[in-house]
Amino acid sequence: MTIDPSVAAKLVVALDVPSAGEALDLAAKLKGRVGMFKVGLELFCAEGPAFVREVQKAGPVFLDLKLHDIPNTVARALEALLPLDPSLLTIHTQGGPAMMEAAAEAVRAHRQRGGRTRLLGVTILTSLGPEALARLGSTAEPGDLALHLARLAKDCGCDGVVCSAREAAAVRAACGEAFHRLTPGIRPGGVAAQDQARVVTPAQALREGATWLVVGRPITQAPDPAAAADAILRDMATA
């Protein structure tokens, strides 16, 4: 299968599997096929920085830790993580303006030293729908709140946000093309939504303005992960 490299670069595979061995096996099977590998909180807590370096042998890493704490603590945590030079790192936008500004300053300093990391703010988790937000005390619609948080993240110096693909077009319109939009909750046609409340297909996500798509279980739990990735890339190419 021949896929435009610019399309393949937009596909991020979430290595949300129980063990480092499984994750590294998946990364080896998908090496050269996808743009990035996501290392999330579970595997990072279990395996640590050395594991990230192993994954980086197969491709760039999106380190998705969603940091959320007081500004000084988040800045110091980033200073400890940035020597790994992941392509992307995440914080929670709901940590507030001061926290985001401190994080953005740490990442800017890293880039001035030659690093490549970009900082993304998580807006509203794709597992949260209106009912869940209401239970948290918010009367806002998820899309409206995500857009407000995206604008705030840009003002605070973030390089982009993590948002549902359903919000990507509005974020692009409000914050500009250069402000990146990484979209989880991607499910190919016919695949169950599972625990995601707001999902779209790969092609729909790109049409809506996503910069990168994060896909996990439709690839990692497939009998043939490489074939599953190829099918998603073909769908993306139609956009």
Image: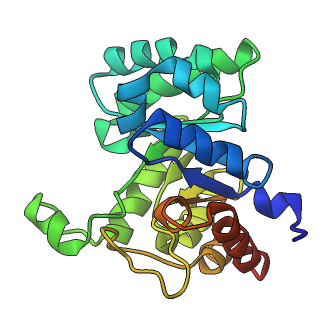
Residue 43 in which image quadrant? top left
Q: Is residue 56 rendered to the left or right of residue 80?
A: right
Q: Is residue 48 visible?
A: yes
Q: Residue at x 72, y 38 (%)?
A: 59
**x, y percentage for residue 216?**
50, 59
Q: Is residue 24 above or below residue 73?
A: below
**x, y percentage for residue 151?**
48, 52
Q: Is residue 149 rendered to the left or right of residue 62?
A: left
Residue 3 in which image quadrant? bottom right
Q: Is residue 60 above or below residue 46?
A: below
Q: Nearer the viewer, residue 220 or 202?
A: 220
Q: Residue at x 13, y 67 (%)?
A: 134
Q: Residue at x 62, y 32 (%)?
A: 55
Q: Is residue 158 rendered to the left or right of residue 35?
A: left
Q: Is residue 33 above or below residue 37?
A: below
Viewport quadrant of the N terminus:
bottom right
Viewport quadrant of the C terminus:
bottom right
**x, y percentage for residue 47?**
43, 24
**x, y percentage for residue 23?**
53, 42
Q: Is residue 69 above or below residue 238?
A: above
Residue 138 in which image quadrant? bottom left
Q: Nearer the viewer, residue 110 or 61?
A: 61
